[in-house]
Amino acid sequence: MSIDILFKIGAIGILVTVINQVLSHAGKNEIATFVTLAGVVIVLVMVMEMVANLFSTVQTLFGLF
Amino acid sequence: MLIKIIGIGLATVFISSILKSTKPEISILINMAGSVLILCLIFPSLKDILDVCLAFADDSDLIKSMLLPVIKIVGVSFLTEFVADTLEESGNKNMANRIVFAGKIIILVMCLPIIKTLFKSLFEIL
């Protein structure tokens, strides 16, 4: 795990915003919604992996459960 | 190490403030990722501290039986605080309060053996 994941998520966010605006101007609002949804899901998967990693670290460190 | 953590904190705040106006849901996730990164960086040092505490307690069985629940409680409070802060930051104060409440109850349940021992020894004295 390193700092590039932050920049990756930021890049995904900016990319999704730009694609969203282009699609909205072209009148394809329903596809823009799906692009937003896909971006959020991709970022969510990345972050959830990290959070699961953190939780397992805490479990082993403090001898929980 | 400190410089790295400061850099991660600043980068998180900058990136999330860029995205806050257009995509608030992704900015919440960036904040979460940043805090996970900082916690994962600091955990090896925390492990050293806990190892020293456990080495002190190694020769006494009583201290060890008291120290292990305390360490567990610190872990529970770590997780509760992390999740509650994340939720509160994303504007869901209600859910954050519920999670803090649940964490308090779990900590109290973990304390019960210690409280029981305390009262037992108290009644033996009286």
Image: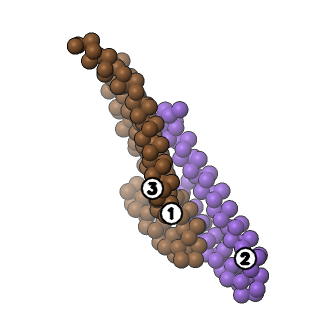
Chain colours: A purple, B brown
Mark 3 and mark 1 in contact? Answer it, CB < 8 Å: no
- Comes first in the chain, label 3 or label 1: 3
**From the image, which quarter does the N terminus of chain B lie in?**
bottom left
Q: Which residue is drawn at the image coordinates 32% and 27% (left, top)?
A: B56
Task: Report the amino acid beneath label 1.
Answer: Ser
- The alpha-carbon separation of the residues under discs 3 and 2 comes to 31 Å
- Report helix, strand or loop for mark 1: loop
Q: Nearer the viewer, mark 1 or mark 2?
A: 1
In the image, is B123 to the left or to the right of A37? left
- Report helix, strand or loop for mark 2: helix
- The alpha-carbon separation of the residues under discs 1 and 2 comes to 24 Å
Task: Report the amino acid beneath label 3.
Answer: Asp
Mark linked to residue A32: 2
Q: Which residue is drawn at the image coordinates 46% and 68% (left, top)?
A: B13
Where residue B75 sits: x, y (%)? 44, 40
Chain that bears disc 1:
B
| Residue A14 appears in view | yes
Where residue B10 sits: x, y (%)? 43, 67
What residue occupies the far bottom of the structure in this picture?
Answer: A25
Mark linked to residue B85: 3
Asked if badges 1 and 2 are on one and the same chain, I answer no
Chain that bears disc 2:
A
